[in-house]
Image: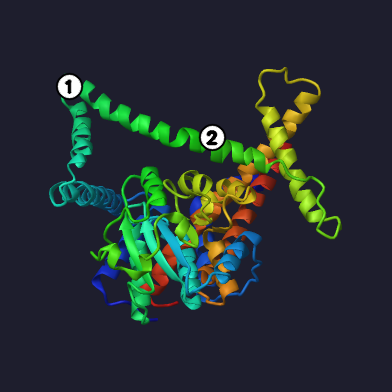
Amino acid sequence: MNWAKQLQNIDRRIIYTILMIGLIVPLIWPIGIPLSTQEVTRSIYNIIEDLDPATDVVLLSFDYSPASAPDLHPSSVALVEHLTARGIRWVAVSFWPEGPQMSEMIMRDLEARGLTYGEDFIDLGFMAGGENAIMSFAQDSRVIKTDVRGNNIDTLTLMDGIVDMNDFAFVIGLSAGDPGYNAFIRQAVDPMGVKFAAAVVTVSVPAAMPFVSSGQMKGLLGGLRGAAEYEQLTGIIGQGAAMMDAQSIGHLIIVAFIIVGNVAYFFSKKN
Amino acid sequence: MNISMSVWTWVMAACMLAIFSFIYKENPIYRFAEHVFVGSTAGHAIGTAIGNIHRFGYVPLTTNNEWHFIVPFVLGLMLYARFIKGYAWVSRWPIAYLVGNGVGLSLFTSLNSQAILQARATMIDIIVHDTAGNFLLNRTFDNFLLVFGVLVVLTYFVFSIPQSGPVKRISQAGRWVMMITFGVSFGNVVAGRISLLLGQLTTLLSTWLGII
């Protein structure tokens, strides 16, 4: 059957064109496809909702680079917006060299809105050493002597009472690879009992899910969808929700092409 | 529409479109953008590495008189002996240290976190009731699926008994579970790539063209 053979050999440029149109149109004219919230996302939301703004400090570990930012940065922003809305102070650290760039983008925006570096949040910057560094920081959170702006951490009130990672009320790893959530689980969560959750890139979700099922991670934000769900929970709509319509349409187009390809394959085999 | 007047935004957009031009066919513009990307990434990595050596090694060594930092400096320099004919063996010492450090760091922790605790997490109630004694169908189905999946997949990898009869059927079920899992993983990979593409399209449409 000619049509079956033709369908199996659709020019990839046609596929890309249809996909591009399917992605661009919902970005310009949003549809508003409803989004359900998963339990793993709600868990993180509930933990932050239960934190005490007067005493609790959260640690955010920015372990991703600009290459993974489209997938993971919306989750970081959604989490920071929630912490900011609740008045919870947070400390940023990074075990990836590009991590401080990502946290700096968020901090610059918060400072422009009137929040104060040193009081509402601080950035300890990048610590070299990979999993070694995570272990070292977990056991002694004062091992980094100065923050990214050159301030001695002993002069920063946000670090008062912080000796090791257990002194943070909640630790969230924003992970795009290694070192990431795996290293935190091995070096901080299981040996020390640190309360930990992660936001990961979509690709890492299947590998990270067993750690949520076992209770080693308290929750999980999976890529762009995780960010969209979290924005829906907090009511602070950002990039995650804005891109979900396009993401859904993109997935439908790919599913359609897979079905078309398989139908054509079976018909051509039948012949 | 509010097109950006920043030169760097236009450079960014031009680079993105140059890379996207590969979709049509490979062309010199794509190759130029690709080479610029590879070169700038390498340059950035070298700059970052030198900065890290300076911040985390040289400054503590010279400013804070932390003389023990001389050890990683020497070990790091010994690595470069690999490129000197006749002295490549010198680089084996720092490599041995790195391997030993990595094994020591992860041997127990990997076994504990990724094997023992994960195995413990499969020891769950297959028939689940809530605190009032009511049967929970969803949780029961989830837990049964989890335990069933783990057992059949592990059976697939048991090579010390013949894979025949009931063992073969269980092992085939394990194969199906793995194929479904690989499909899920592949689906997540596709979703991840779509997310990255969406990020780039959003940047073009909002930062460059100001349409959204």
Residue at numbered disc 1? B87
- Rendered position, A82 above or below B167: below
Tell me the amino acid under the disc marked 2.
Answer: Leu
Which residue, as the protein is rendered here, is positioned at the far left? B62
Element assignment for label 1: loop
Answer with left or right where residue B198 lies relative to residue A39.
Answer: left
Q: Is residue B24 visible?
A: no
Residue at numbered disc 2? B111
In the rendered image, residue B127, in percent from the top left (x then y), is placed at 82, 47
Answer with left or right where residue A210 lies relative to residue A116.
Answer: right
In the rendered image, residue A115, in percent from the top left (x then y), is placed at 37, 79
In the rendering, which numbered label is found on residue B189? none
Tell me the amino acid under the disc marked 1.
Answer: Tyr
Labels 2 and 1 touching (C-beta < 8 A) = no
At horizontal 50% and vertical 44% (from top left) the residue drawn is A191
Answer with left or right where residue B16 lies relative to residue A18.
Answer: left
| Camera-side residue of A167 and A84 | A167
Element assignment for label 2: helix
Q: Quadrant of the C terminus of chain A?
A: top right
The answer for which chain carries disc 1 is B
Q: Is residue B135 visible?
A: yes
| Camera-side residue of A210 and A121 | A121
Q: Quadrant of the N terminus of chain A?
A: top right
Which of discs 2 and 1 lies nearer the camera? The answer is: 2
At horizontal 21% and vertical 27% (from top left) the residue drawn is B82
Tell me the crowding category of disc 1: few under 14, some 14 to 19, or many 20 or more residues within 10 angstroms, Cα based. Answer: few
| Camera-side residue of B165 and A20 | B165
Q: CA distance from mark 2 to mark 1?
A: 37 Å
In the rendered image, residue B180, in percent from the top left (x then y), is placed at 67, 42
Q: Earlier in the sequence, mark 2 or mark 1?
A: 1
